[in-house]
Structure formats: structure tokens, C-alpha cells
Amino acid sequence: MKKLRIGVVPYMNAKPLIYGLSRLSNSIELSFEVPSLLPGMLDNNQVDVAIIPSVEYIRSGKYVIVPDISISSAGIVESVKLFSKVPVQEIRTIALDKSSLTSSMLTRIIIKELYHISPQYLSWNKHYDISRSDSDAVLLIGDNAMRVTNDEYVTLDLGQVWFEYTGLPFVYAVWAIKKDHHIPGINALLKDTKEAGIRSVDIIAAEEAQRLQLPYERCLHYLTHSIRYDLGKNEIKGLKAFYQHIVSSGPASKDMEIVFHAA
């Protein structure tokens, strides 16, 4: 029997969505990769389903979404942050985490629309040792963002800034499948897996605390308060608002259609 190939991000925030899948190694093959590379793996049929950046769903038009599941936040997110050595209004250069697509776009939107500045954007691939960057500010995502202490920098939590700006959740990633593919049973499998992960979040928090060398309480709070895993009406409104901000400077925008994978 051919294994179901699933592409996932390696960060703590995704662990509740894949909890228990590794035990199904006879029927499932997990591939861990940074968000910016997973859409290409899906396009090239290296995986059958993947957690992809929401901006890639918006831009490509190639995918359908597995319903009821996302990686999102409604307020402080902790793991998507802009760290600046200078006051935000004085930022002239920003290094964007090379592994990010959605958060890089969110950074550009916030900097342009809220702070009305036009810095030069560079690429950053040195993980969380941002002291080595020559840029005024650095965007970090995932586990790397959580390892940096805020005390040394002017810090923008982009989930919090977005929520204060729009009043809506921000959707960072969704489960996606190519439009011309249909995978029977995948909706139920991934929803059941999410629910099992949420029920076991204390175990996941303990494992991640050890892996990342972070306090257990912080990991538990992150997984239960900062990150959300549903894709309900408000999350869809947030996803559509993100789309509107992306296209606002282009041709007349229309409402984005959300297409779900059929059960």
C-alpha cells in the first residue's frame, strides 16, 4: 500500500496538528521542512498534503484547504516577531527570516500601513543569533523567535499588532492539497489528529520544553493561549482581510473564495 506523504513544519506550533501521526508510520510518511519550502514540495508531488503558508494559498490558486484546521492567533502569538535595534520609525533595513512567506508579507503590510515607512528588505538565514545582523530589524518566526529575549530590542509581536489593527485573527498556515487531487478520509484523519493533539497538549508542552530548553509553563501557555488551531468564521474573515491587504495596491480587489477539500 502506498504511504500517505504529509509535509509539516518542524516548529512547536504545529506539534498538536501532527500528534500521533508518527505512530502510523506503516501508512504515513512525514516530511519536516520550513514553511517557505513546503508549497514547492506539494507542487512537485513530493508530498500529498502539507501545512502551507496562508499567503501561498492566497497567491497561487492551486490548492484546496482541509476544513476546520489552521495555525492562527487572535492577539499575542509569541513566535512571529520583529526585533529592532532602533525605534520602529527609524528602521531603514529589515532582514526577513528566509524560512517565512506569510510572516514576511505580514511584516511588509504592517510596516507600510501602520508605520508609513519604506525600509529596504533583506534576507536572513542565521536563525536566532540576530546580534550578527547588520540590519536595523530582523523578523524571526517559529521556535527561533521564542528563543530571543525581548529586553535587548524594540519588539513587535506581529500577531498582536494585526489583531489590534483589524480586530480579527491572523491565519499563518493551513493544511492544503492540490486542486486536482482528492484524498479520501484525509479531512477526518487530520481533524481527529488535531483533536487528539489538543487533548494531549500537556504532554506535547513537556516534550517541547525539553527540546527547546524553554520553561514548561511557557510552552503550555503558548500552545493553549497564543496559538489557535481552528478555522472558523472569524479565522476565515481574518484570512480574507489578509488577502485584501495584499491586493489593496493592485487592481480592483474582489472577495477571495475559500475552496475546501471535499470529505
Image (cartoon, helix red, strand yellow):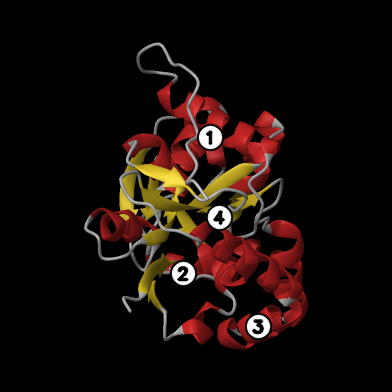
The secondary element bearing badge 1 is classed as helix
Name the residue carrying label 2: 128
Q: Is residue 124 visible?
A: no
Q: Residue 109: horizontal and vertical position, in percent? A: 48, 33
Q: Residue 177: horizontal and vertical position, in percent? A: 39, 52
Q: Is residue 199 visible?
A: yes
User: Identity of the amino acid at label 4?
Assistant: Val
User: Identity of the amino acid at label 3?
Assistant: Ala
Q: Residues within 10 Å of mark 4 (few under 14, many from 20)?
A: many
Name the residue carrying label 3: 209
Q: Earlier in the sequence, mark 1 or mark 2?
A: 1
Which residue is at the front of the view, 80 or 3?
Answer: 3
Residue 87 in the image: above or below residue 203? above
User: Identity of the amino acid at label 2?
Assistant: Tyr
Q: Residues within 10 Å of mark 3 (few under 14, many from 20)?
A: some
Residue 70 in the image: above or below residue 257? below
Which residue is at the front of the view, 80 or 235?
Answer: 235
In the picture, the disc for residue 110 is 1
Which residue is at the front of the view, 15 or 61?
Answer: 61
Name the residue carrying label 4: 80
The secondary element bearing badge 2 is classed as loop
Q: Is residue 258 left or right of residue 59?
A: right
Q: Earlier in the sequence, mark 3 or mark 1?
A: 1
Gap in angstroms between the C-alphas marked 3 and 2: 17 Å
